[in-house]
Every structure is written in C-alpha cells, then in structure tokens.
Amino acid sequence: MSNTNADQDSGPFQGALPKGATVVQSESVWKSRRPWTGLLDRAGVEGMGLHRKSSMRASFFVIVCLVLGLTAAASAMTLRSSDIRPTGMIANRFIFNSFGCSGENAQPSVAWGGVPKGTKALALTVFDPDAPTTVGFVHWLLLRIPPIATSTSNVSTAVNGLTDFGEPGYHGPCPPSGDKPHRYIFTLYALDTDFPFTQQTTYAAFRFTIRRHVLATATLIGRYGR
C-alpha cells in the first residue's frame, strides 16, 4: 500500500478532490489502470537487447574496416631514395652537366617495396611537370624492370627508353636559370604485363600502352632550381 498526497494540479485525480485530501490505493490497482506500463517495460527490455545487438554489429563492422585498412596500408607499394629527400632539393651530383648546368649527372639510387601480387614488370619514370613546355619533360624512362627487383641497383636486364633529351638513360635536372625550383616526380609502376618496350619507346607510347594494366603506383618528388 502507498499513500499519495495529491493536489488539484497533479496526478490522475487532478481537480476531483478538495485540496489537502488523501488518496489511498493499492499499487496493483494503480497498475491495473495503466495496462500499458507492462508493455512499455517489456518493450524497454527488448529495445535494450536490440540496441546491444546493433552496437555489437557496429563494433564488429568498425573492427573489420580497421583490419582491412591496416592490411591495405601494409601492402601499399612504396618508393624511396637514399639520395633524394622527399620534396627536398636534389644534390648537384645528380644534376645534368650541360645546357648551363654543371652537375655530375649521376644516377640516383631508388628503392621500393610492397610490389603487388600479379606484377609482371615494373617501370620507373622521372618527369618534370614544371618544364617550360606544354607537356612537361621526361628525364628518365626505365622499362621492363623484373618484378623481383627491389632497387635500381639490381636492374641490369631493364631497358632504358627514350627521354626528352633524345636518347635513352638518366638525364639529371637542368631547369632554366631564374625559374622557381622545378618538381622532379619519380614514379614507379607495377604492371600486369611485361610489354616488349625497347630503347626507342617514348614516354607517350609507354603511357598509352600501359592503360588498364597498372596494378599500383608509388611516387617520390625531389626539387631543383638555379
């Protein structure tokens, strides 16, 4: 049994009793007048169960996404160089030695990792998008690199394609004097086909041929100005 003090402004007996009157009723009677109470109680319990299940499913989904994301990140192909710091200035040793430039034109060491499964050949290009031409300038086109190779130091069977200097092989940066530093983009391509490229293959022919055959790419950018 429970005693409830009710006034004219509250409760189910609002305005029915004089002020200060006491109402005595059993809890069972009160609940009988609220048949929806039990339904709400059951709905609340069931709702909590559904919420927990939804939360568990959401947590599981997040965990799966994280695992897949970490796996993808771990298997991403990477490109690095002990000679060129990312976005850093390229040392004079790797600069061209003509057209007003006085570098040594040494070929920088480039290494990579994370080559995807199914790769049949790799290719490495060095491209200057800031050159005063309408199509940039190609400084290096190294083709048919064996997929088991991990750096430019063990690619003796690779083929040097034709650069914009008119001959194959590495040719270092040499931007016009007074230009702001140019970007030299090293790009590694993992290809699903070992195309029969030769020393006469141009950059344009290379890019046209590899359409829809690129499994992954990785880039490294150096800069140089004078």
Image (tube, helix red, strand yellow):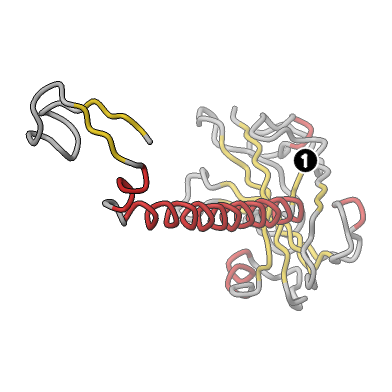
* Position of residue 7 measured from the top left corner of the image (x, y, whole percent): 15, 26
Left/right placement of residue 187 relative to residue 21 reads: right
* Closer-to-camera residue (225/63): 63
Q: Quadrant of the N terminus?
A: top left
Q: Is residue 139 visible?
A: no
Q: In terms of image quadrants, where is residue 89?
A: top right
Q: How many callouts does the rendering have?
A: 1
Q: Residue at x 39, y 54 (%)?
A: 38
Q: Residue at x 92, y 56 (%)?
A: 154
* Position of residue 92 measured from the top left corner of the image (x, y, whole percent): 74, 30
Left/right placement of residue 34 relative to residue 82 reads: left
In the figure, 101 relative to 46: above or below? above
Q: Quadrant of the C terminus?
A: top right
Q: Residue at x 35, y 33 (%)?
A: 2
* Closer-to-camera residue (34/45): 34
* Amino acid type indicated by mark 1: Asn
Which residue in the structure is indicated by mark 1? 105
